[in-house]
Each structure stands twice: as structure tokens, then as C-alpha cells.
Amino acid sequence: MINSKHEKSIENVCDLNYLKEMMGSKKHLINEIMDAFLKQVPEELQSIKEAITKTDYAIIKSFSHTMKSSVSIMGVSKLTPVLQEMEDLATKETDIEKIKELNDTLNLICKQATEEIEREKMNYA
Amino acid sequence: MLKILKMKNEINIFIVDDNNVFTLALKADIANAFKTIPLKINIFETGEKCMEKFKEEKPDVVILDYYLNKKFQDAANGIKVLEWIKKENPDTHVIMLTSDDDIDVALKSFHSGAIDYVVKTETQFRKINYSLINVFKIMEAKRYEKRYKNLLVGVYVFIALIVGAVLAIRISEHSL
């Protein structure tokens, strides 16, 4: 109980209202999309991480771009400007150090989003 | 707005995009937006996988992403897939999706036979749904056109038969 109170005091990064509104009462669909998100995000983060070590701007650009779609469906609006900046820098092929910084923020927020969705999924099991 | 469309025949839609979260959400959103229309929606991660099924089903509409090689780097891009589709079945309507508002991609898409071009934005689903409404209207108009053509052919045949019969009667009267 103490734990759940504590969790509530932290501001959620996901806003699942959009998804719920779109799906209506079809809980299995929400569940399916959450599963896809939980599977896809670590893969995308891994691809970005690898691309950063190789300074492969094209890959950074394409993954930061595609992540914008997936996180916006989960209502993680905090990540939109982070991913946008990452994509812009990668498009200009510049400032890998700033990209690394943004990537740290991205990983941190994604970790929180993933935890929230895992908790939320319990309601849809 | 959507109630205008009352289509009886099932519409077969393929969605091709390698972002699974996006395709699943789009599929659910389309089903939700067009509740009155019987739809069958298949999703594919690459153009190659889409084409295997395409040959069997010849879908009415394909919603096709331009960038299909993020996850699978050897996968064909959207324009290539669009060309395959149009070669296989020119009647399939293709709505092209792109991440950037890139005029070159737009022109290439239209040149290769796409019926519409939608830029993915935050209101992406709404835009795609508007595009689908237009495609459904075109499909309906084409169906009417076909029906009227058949009706017209029927009328011509009927007139020809009457003229033929009248002539035959006249000829037989003369010969008497």
C-alpha cells in the first residue's frame, strides 16, 4: 500500500487516455498494443545505442523518428521534444555529444514509461 | 459524416509498416472509425510479406509506409512495393504514408500510382481516416459507374433486338 501511494506521488509520463478512448472497451486490443510497445521499445533503444557508438547518424535519425510515433500513441508527450531534437541533430549529422545526452534522457523516460505500462497491463490481463 | 457510406461488400485493407505499435493502433482506429462498414484488415511488417498475401487476396486498399527498411535493412522501400502492387493489380488503391513532408517522395508516389499521400503527424490517424473516406467514395462511384454501364449495354441490346425484330417482320411482309 505504501508503495502504491508512493508511486502515485510520482508524476506519470504516460497518458493512456488517448489509447483507451480510441479502443473503447476492447481491452484485448489495448493489451496487444501495450505488448507491442514493451517488445519494441527496448529494440529501438538498443538500435539507437549501437548507432551512437558507431556515430551512424542515418540510423539515429530513422529510429528517433519512428519512436516518435510509438511514444505518442502511449501519450509520452515528454519524449516528443527529446526525440525531435535527436532527429534534427542526426539529420544535420552533428553534435554526437548532445545526442548522447538526449539518449540518456530518452532511456530514463522510457524506463519509467515501461514500468507504468507494465503496471497498467495488470488491469488488462 | 461516416454514416453516408453504407457499403455492403467487405473491404479488404492491408497496412504495411514496420512499427508494430503504430500498425496495431491504426488498425484498431480504422475499425473504430468505420463501424458501419464491414472491413477486413491485415497488417504486415515488410512489403515482401505483404506481396505474398497480396497475390492471393488482391485487397481493395493498401496503406503503405514509405520507409520500410528501419528494422529490416534489406527490405524494399515503399515506392518499390507500390510498383509491385500496381503491376499485380492496378485496381488496388494505395495510400502512401511518409514521415517527412518530402515533395520528392510525394511526387514519386503519385507518379507510381498512389491515390493519396499522408504525412504522419500527431493527428495521423484522423488524416488517414479522411483519406480512406475518399477512397471508399471513389470505390462506390466506380461500382455505380459499372452498374450504369451494364444497364446501358442492356438498353442497347434491347433496342437492337426490337429494331432487328421490326426489320425481320418488315422483310418477311415484303417477301410475302
Image (cartoon, coloured by chain):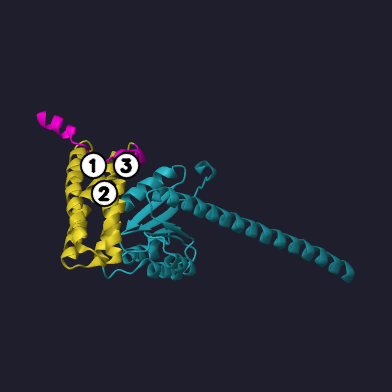
Chain colours: A yellow, B cyan
Pinpoint residue B108: horizontal percent, then vertical percent.
Answer: 45, 69
Relative placement, left or right, of A108 versus B115 is left
Q: Which residue is mark 3?
A: A19
Quadrant of res A88: bottom left
The local secondary structure at tag 3 comes to: helix
> Mark 2 is on which residue type?
Leu
Q: Earlier in the sequence, mark 1 or mark 2?
A: 1
The local secondary structure at tag 1 comes to: loop
Q: Earlier in the sequence, mark 2 or mark 3?
A: 3
Residue at the image position 50 percent from the left and 55 percent from the top? B135
Residue at the image position 47 percent from the left and 67 percent from the top? B107
Relative placement, left or right, of A23 versus A100 is right
Q: Which residue is mark 2?
A: A79
Q: Which secondary structure dominates the residues rendered in magenta?
A: helix
Quadrant (top left/top right/bottom left/bottom right) for the C terminus of chain B: bottom right
Q: In the image, is residue B105 above or below residue A118? A: below
Give me the C-alpha separation between circle 2 and circle 3. Answer: 17 Å
> Mark 3 is on which residue type?
Leu
